[in-house]
Image (cartoon, rainbow, N blue to C red):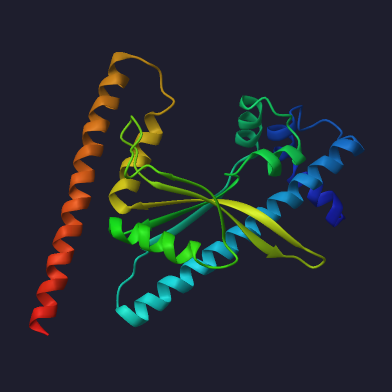
Amino acid sequence: MATIYDNRVTRQRETLKDFFGGDEKEEIPDELLDRLFQFEALMTKYRCAIREITTKLEILNDELSASTKQNPIETIQSRIKRPYSIAEKLKRQNQPVTVEAISRHLNDVAGIRVICPFIKDIYAVEKMLIQQDDVHLIARKDYIRSPKESGYRSLHLVVEIPVFFSMKKENIRVEIQIRTVAMNFWASLEHQIRYKNESQGVQDIVKELKECADTIAKTDEKMQELKLRIENHEKKEA
């Protein structure tokens, strides 16, 4: 009967191949196995940090839903970067592919995407989250007010939060992307074409996507304006 240890080794063979290279059928040296378990432990910490941030966001949304009957958050999505993607990013930064380099040089291993109905909700969610005394803002990039050349729009935050484990507390970084439903729809389609070739057909699609991004931005602004008018109308009738 396989032991828990054996099962862990079997489960991590794909990680071994993605992150450290080599043949997943080969015998795993003790040193490499130690690195593998260190990597697994670090990913667990990132998953815990995601849960901490997600809980904070859900509490804020529940509170506002009860007190103002408005939900500034439509959905919350999360992911942990795949081992292969982690290794590739470290290599692009000319960093060693080690567990230590991950926590030192990468801010987006743990990622959360917050989808909001309106643009003003994006900044409201940001303010409510950042003002919490255990959330430390590391970096901020506003691609809504300053879109990327491709037309990409989203608010990116890198935050650091304390996570309490059985023996100690650790500060873990999480990247948070906050965008509207329309921005997210556009970004999902743009992601499919991002790494395609440079053929004329692809370039035509990229151009049309940029035009769509501009149209979506205007639509987001118009929908926010209409919502404000509806709210003002309701106040007058109250």
User: Residue at the location (55% across, 62% down)?
Assistant: 53
Q: Disc count in the image?
A: 0
Give the quarter of the figure containing the C terminus: bottom left
Name above or below for residue 56 compared with residue 237: above
In this rendering, position of residue 110 left or right of residue 127: right
Name above or below for residue 161 compared with residue 141: below
At which x and y percent is residue 106? 63, 40
In this rendering, position of residue 106 left or right of residue 158: right
User: Can you name the residue that lies furthest to the bottom here?
Assistant: 238
Name above or below for residue 80 compared with residue 131: above
User: Residue at the location (75% across, 65% down)?
Assistant: 165
Residue 121: name its quadrant.
bottom left
At which x and y percent is residue 162? 66, 62
User: Residue at the location (51% across, 54% down)?
Assistant: 78
At which x and y percent is residue 71? 33, 70
User: Residue at the location (80% across, 46% down)?
Assistant: 38
Name above or below for residue 147 compared with residue 134: above
In this rendering, position of residue 28 left or right of residue 146: right
At which x and y percent is residue 19? 70, 34
- Residue placed most toward the observer, 72 or 141: 141
- Residue placed most toward the observer, 60 or 205: 60
In this rendering, position of residue 125 left or right of residue 166: left
